[in-house]
Amino acid sequence: MNPPAMGDDPILPGGTMQLTDRLDERTCELLADGFDAARERPVTLRANTLKATSDQISTALDAAGIGYARVPWYEDAFVLDGAREREVWGLDIYRDGLVYLQSLSSMLPPLILDPLAGADILDMCSAPGGKTSQIAALTANGAHLTACEMSAPRAEKLAYNLDKLGAQNVNIMRTDARRLDEFFSFDQILLDAPCTGTGTYRTGDERAEKRMTPQLLDKVVKSQRALLDRALTVLKPGGTLVYSTCSVLPEENDEQVRAALKRHRDCKVVPILAGNVDDGQSDPEERVITIARADEGEFAWPIMNLPNSLEGTLTLAPTRLYEGFYVAAIQKQAPRTRR
Ligand SMILES: C[S@@+](CC[C@H](N)C(=O)[O-])C[C@H]1O[C@@H](n2cnc3c(N)ncnc32)[C@H](O)[C@@H]1O
């Protein structure tokens, strides 16, 4: 594919959001390739370990004649071989909440959060509950979870999903998380923010092109800023916030985080990225870079990080397997102890 000319609108052809005005040529080229590849993106799902082991899910998929690949960085993740969502809806493992349809990229923020049993955890923007239920599964229902959702119908869907998946110890709050009482405090927070969704775009998706306007960008950027401020206020000293979006626009990602850190001088980025961003291999899905939160063990996965400006954050490029996604981990300093 030829690099797009600056000023053209080759990525969202009918849309008004000019990615080429915002991103450099190389990034636009990677995005254009990824948006094309996304048209072939396979269905992926997560074994819900609150109800079944991943081996039980393998057995059920085998019995249903559905081929799949396992994911090296997460034993609960499955990539289906040709099956569509409709086929999964007909399976008992789906109806009974033993699996959850979830994109691979969206499984990353809870893993990077590394939720701890016994911790007070806030999921600020939680419906329909994919990541809330993943946090519940990662802690075997052992965390004290608060799940906020502003939209009433989406909060209902959240409650339905959490019940279906067997998530317990979750206090659902139908509220605007920007106005969460400052009286609250949490050890760990996930802010999976409302965003433009540019990372999920597939070439030719005209509805998405119409939706992703500069007006939408303005609106979500304001909301993300207010949500980040509230999150960093209710985060306990020493606690960690994971901020994520399914967008690839710097305004929603690195620029948003950098500005928040200026307003909250007691907070800093915890690097989640170590390793090579672009080692020159032609197939980005064959590249294995190492991701690690500085305070966690390392694990490796085949993904591509787009050039980004804030060291230690992750801007996943869209590829056939992965939606474009952004993840940053931020820690609030613990008070100094006196000697
Ligand atoms: C990206 S989606 C979250 C997806 C969810 N984390 C998951 O994994 O299933 C963002 C959600 O935030 C909700 N939302 C937007 N603004 C909010 C706010 N100020 N307070 C609480 N929820 C909000 C939206 O209604 C939407 O359901």
Image (spheres, rainbow, N blue to C red):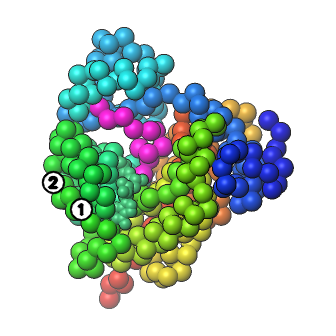
- For disc 1, the neighbor class at 10 Å (few under 14, some 14 to 19, many from 20) is some
In the image: residue 284, left or right of residue 68 = right
Marks 2/1 in contact by CB < 8 Å: the verdict is no
Position of 106 relative to 124 (above/below): above
- For disc 2, the neighbor class at 10 Å (few under 14, some 14 to 19, many from 20) is few
Q: Which amino acid lies under the numbered mark 2 shown in the image of this protein?
A: Asn
Depth check: 106 or 75 in front? 106
Give how far across and how far down residue 287 sits, in percent. Answer: 63, 37
For the residue labelled by badge 1, is the local secondary structure a helix, a strand or a loop? strand
In the image: residue 49, left or right of residue 41 = left
Give how far across and how far down residue 191 sits, in percent. Answer: 39, 61
> In front of the other: label 2 or label 1?
1
Spatial separation of the CA atoms under disc 2 and disc 1: 16 Å
Give how far across and how far down residue 3 sits, in percent. Answer: 82, 44
Give how far across and how far down residue 265 sits, in percent. Answer: 48, 82
Q: Which mark is residue 174?
A: 1
Is the residue at mark 2 in contact range of ligand 1, meaning its CB lies under 8 Å from it? no
Answer whether residue 193 is visible to the viewer in this image: yes
Quadrant in which ligand 1 is drawn? bottom left
Residue at 27% over, 66% down: 175
100 falls in the magenta region: yes
Q: Which quarter of the image is occupied by the N terminus?
A: top right
Give the image quarter of residue 204. Answer: top right
Residue, disc 2: 169
Is the residue at mark 1 in contact range of ligand 1, meaning its CB lies under 8 Å from it? no
Position of 263 relative to 297 (above/below): below
Q: Which quarter of the image is occupied by the C terminus?
A: bottom left
In the image: residue 92, left or right of residue 202 = left
Which comes sooner in the sequence, label 2 or label 1?
2
Which residues are the magenta region? 99-109
